[in-house]
């Protein structure tokens, strides 16, 4: 479970009664796509013939550019998650990160899922005794990619949802 039981109005668009602007929604989607793409090679090393996670990342970006509708980006995210189902470890987490990135068009709060799964992928890609350090490096890289306009929102979201995101945002 990476979504809170009560939706945060900061991640609901203004037209749906929340506080999120369309421009910030797009920035969240782009950031999530970057997080997922950063670990995509971990999936592609295991399944080079399966394009679904890469397609989900592309769909997130296509939605941001207005080239595809939200439902298409969301569906691509679901297909990426389907690519993860029979895998384990880093490859599975990387595919889930891509799936979460595709879903941001539908629910902005999936942005943290993309980041959390990417950190889990980075942790799983190294020997167990190096996992925490690898996760911290990935988290630091992600935070460096945050656009200033959404930085406070995402950092607060990490603080609030860290417990339901496997505590990957510690440190």
Image (tube, rainbow, N blue to C red):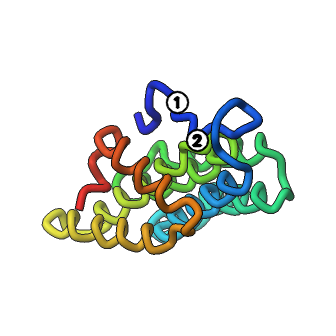
Residue 24 x, y percent position in the rendering:
65, 55
Kindly identify the residue that appears in the image at 57 percent across and 49 percent down: 99
Residue 14 occupies quadrant: top right
Residue tagged 1: 7
Q: Residue furthest top?
A: 5
Q: Residue furthest left?
A: 129
Residue tagged 2: 11
Residue 143 occupies quadrant: bottom left
Residue 91 x, y percent position in the rendering:
43, 59
Establish if 125 lies above or below 154. below
State the quadrant of the C terminus: bottom left
How many numbered circles are shown? 2
Establish if 146 lies above or below 160. below
SS type, badge 2: helix
State the quadrant of the N terminus: top left
Kindly identify the residue that appears in the image at 52 percent across and 30 percent down: 7
SS type, badge 1: loop
Residue 56 occupies quadrant: bottom right
User: Closer to the camera, 77 or 89?
Assistant: 77
Residue 9 x, y percent position in the rendering:
57, 35
Residue 112 x, y percent position in the rendering:
47, 50
Circle 1 packing at 10 Å, graded few (<14), some (14-19), many (20+), is: few
Q: Is residue 80 left or right of residue 66?
A: left
Establish if 27 lies above or below 102. below
Kindly identify the residue that appears in the image at 53 percent across and 51 percent down: 111
Q: Is residue 18 left or right of residue 7?
A: right
The label shown at residue 108 is: none
Whether residue 50 is visible here, answered yes or no, is no
Whether residue 132 is visible here, answered yes or no, is yes
Q: CA distance from mark 1 to mark 2?
A: 8 Å
**In contact (CB < 8 Å): disc 1 and disc 2:** yes
User: Closer to the camera, 44 or 49?
Assistant: 44
């Amino acid at each position: 479970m990476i979504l809170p039981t009560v939706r945060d109005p900061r991640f609901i668009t203004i037209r749906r009664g929340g506080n999120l602007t369309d421009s910030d929604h797009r920035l969240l989607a782009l950031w999530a796509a970057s997080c997922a793409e950063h670990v995509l090679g971990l999936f592609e090393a295991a399944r080079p013939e399966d394009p679904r996670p890469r397609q989900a990342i592309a769909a997130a970006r296509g939605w941001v550019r207005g080239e595809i509708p939200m439902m298409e980006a969301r569906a691509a995210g679901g297909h990426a998650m389907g690519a993860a189902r029979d895998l384990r470890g880093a490859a599975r987490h990387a595919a889930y990160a891509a799936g979460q990135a595709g879903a941001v068009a539908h629910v902005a709060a999936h942005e943290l899922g993309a980041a959390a799964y990417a950190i889990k992928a980075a942790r799983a890609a190294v020997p167990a005794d190096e996992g925490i350090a690898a996760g911290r490096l990935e988290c630091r890289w992600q935070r460096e990619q945050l656009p200033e306009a959404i930085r406070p929102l995402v950092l607060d979201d990490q603080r609030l949802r860290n417990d339901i995101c496997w505590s990957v945002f510690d440190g």
